[in-house]
């Protein structure tokens, strides 16, 4: 995170996601670790979405993209959430579907990770 806007969005995400999942299992520091992992995975998937828009992806790139998506699903499951993916680099590549329907994405149904 490099800008004040990124920090603010990270805190908003932390506050929102702290409502879900097994808090005793991962605690406050564990939750922040998972949020930062999701941010890192978002950047990776965003890079693959840009590659896909510019050229055909190599088989090893496809494998790494799928592996990254599996890691996102695993983290979301730990938090008690479902993850969805968007391959368009103009938006967030990771969309979390929150149980209470809170959203910060223009689709009106998901929480995006974009910091």
Image: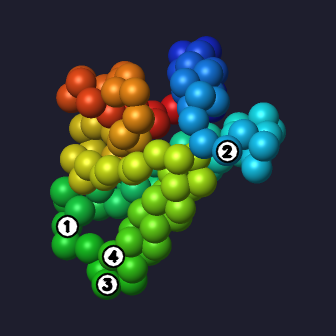
Which quarter of the rendering shows the N terminus?
top right
Left or right of 44? Residue 54 is left
**Mark 1 or mark 2: which comes first in sequence?**
2
Left or right of 115? Residue 4 is right
Q: CA distance from mark 3 to mark 1?
A: 12 Å
Q: CA distance from mark 1 to mark 4?
A: 12 Å
The label on residue 22 is 2
Image coords of residue 92 (percent x, y): 34, 39
Callout 3 crowding tier (Cα within 10 Å): few <14, some 14–19, many ≥20: few
Q: CA distance from mark 4 to mark 3?
A: 5 Å
The label on residue 62 is 4
Image coords of residue 66 (percent x, y): 38, 72
59 or 22: nearer the eye? 22
Which of the colour schemes (rainbow, by chain, secondary structure, one colour) is used? rainbow
Callout 1 crowding tier (Cα within 10 Å): few <14, some 14–19, many ≥20: few
Q: Report the residue marked by disc 1.
A: 55
**Mark 4 or mark 2: which comes first in sequence?**
2
Which type of secondary structure does the marked residue at label 1 adopt? loop
5 or 108: nearer the eye? 108
In the rendered image of this protein, does residue 60 appear above or below residue 97? below
Image coords of residue 76 (percent x, y): 51, 51
In the rendered image of this protein, does residue 36 appear above or below residue 13? below
In the rendered image of this protein, does residue 77 appear above or below residue 99? below
In the rendered image of this protein, does residue 1 appear above or below residue 44? above
Q: CA distance from mark 1 to mark 2?
A: 41 Å
Residue 17 appears in the figure: yes
The label on residue 79 is none
Q: Residue at x 42, y 63 (%)?
A: 69
Give the foreground label among 1 and 2: 2
């Amino acid at each position: 995170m490099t800008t004040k806007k990124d920090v603010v969005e990270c805190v908003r995400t932390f506050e929102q996601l702290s409502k879900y999942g097994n808090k005793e299992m991962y605690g406050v520091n564990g939750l922040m670790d998972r949020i930062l992992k999701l941010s890192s995975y978002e950047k990776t998937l965003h890079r693959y979405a840009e590659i896909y828009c510019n050229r055909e992806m190599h088989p090893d790139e496809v494998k790494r993209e799928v592996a990254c998506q599996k890691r996102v699903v695993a983290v979301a499951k730990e938090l008690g959430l479902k993850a969805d993916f968007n391959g368009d680099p103009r938006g967030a590549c990771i969309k979390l579907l929150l149980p209470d329907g809170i959203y910060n994405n223009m689709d009106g149904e998901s929480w995006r990770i974009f910091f």
